Image: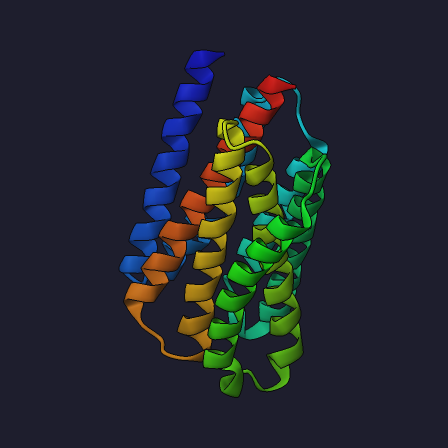
């Protein structure tokens, strides 16, 4: 089993680098091949690695895969891709909330202030370019901010648990990736942003996967 996990981990790295190269070289053909494979390989890796598979997390990975596929064609399916990732984040929020047992009001206030302020800054920067997408993007931004908030609450409840650190960092990097995507699409487009989006997205998904695997071992 360890050999399988190692081999699939190497495959995940190859697929990820392949997609990053596709973005760097503006090779749409390669991107269409490699981008959907990222989550497929990660899902296989999780199912093999986790001691007890969390079906909700597998469902979150499915909607991430669907979002990745739809966002390969942003001019036609951007809203549907956004919706797929919105569902992903709602599922992740549900999962992380299930880990919480003691939520303090002061911690909620502090984490809400941090993630809320960050979202407000990004939203104000891009809002004039959103047009008809202003409401969907606003809802999406609020939901992903809530994911960051509950991840921080989960971390604060047990700072010594390494899986809680993984989940907090994963959620925060996911927020960073989506922020860069928003700036790239609605404020200032750059090839550098395109590469940064994929690198941070891959890192975020992998870190969350690591957190979920450790959670399954602890349970």
At which x and y percent is residue 180? 41, 65
Residue 27's image quarter? bottom left
At which x and y percent is residue 37? 48, 42
At which x and y percent is residue 23? 33, 58
Please name the residue shown 68% across and 54% down the image. Answer: 87
Please name the residue shown 39% across and 31% down the image. Answer: 11
In the image, is residue 208 above or below residue 74? above
In the image, is residue 61 above or below residue 114? above
Please name the residue shown 60% across and 44% down the image. Answer: 153
Near-viewer residue (151 or 195): 151
Question: In the picture, which quadrant includes the C terminus?
Answer: top right
In the image, is residue 74 above or below residue 29? below
At which x and y percent is residue 167? 53, 39
In the image, is residue 219 above or below residue 158? above
Viewed as shown, does residue 26 lie left or right of 34?
left
Near-viewer residue (66 or 182): 182
């Amino acid at each position: 089993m360890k050999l399988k996990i190692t081999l699939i981990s190497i495959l995940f790295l190859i697929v990820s680098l392949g997609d990053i190269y596709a973005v760097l070289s503006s090779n749409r053909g390669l991107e269409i091949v490699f981008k959907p494979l990222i989550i497929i390989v990660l899902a296989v890796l999780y199912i093999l690695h986790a001691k007890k598979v969390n079906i909700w997390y597998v469902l979150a990975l499915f909607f991430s895969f669907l979002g990745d596929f739809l966002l390969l064609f942003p001019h036609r399916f951007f809203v549907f891709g956004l919706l797929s990732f919105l569902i992903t984040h709602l599922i992740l929020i549900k999962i992380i909330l299930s880990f919480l047992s003691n939520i303090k009001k002061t911690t909620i206030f502090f984490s809400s202030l941090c993630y809320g302020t960050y979202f407000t800054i990004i939203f104000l920067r891009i809002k004039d370019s959103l047009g008809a997408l202003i409401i969907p993007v606003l809802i999406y931004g609020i939901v992903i901010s809530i994911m960051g908030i509950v991840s921080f609450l989960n971390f604060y409840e047990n700072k010594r648990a390494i899986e809680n650190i993984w989940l907090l960092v994963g959620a925060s990097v996911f927020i960073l990736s989506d922020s860069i995507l928003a700036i790239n699409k609605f404020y200032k487009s750059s090839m550098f942003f395109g590469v940064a989006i994929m690198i941070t997205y891959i890192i975020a998904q992998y870190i969350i996967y690591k957190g979920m695997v450790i959670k399954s071992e602890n349970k």
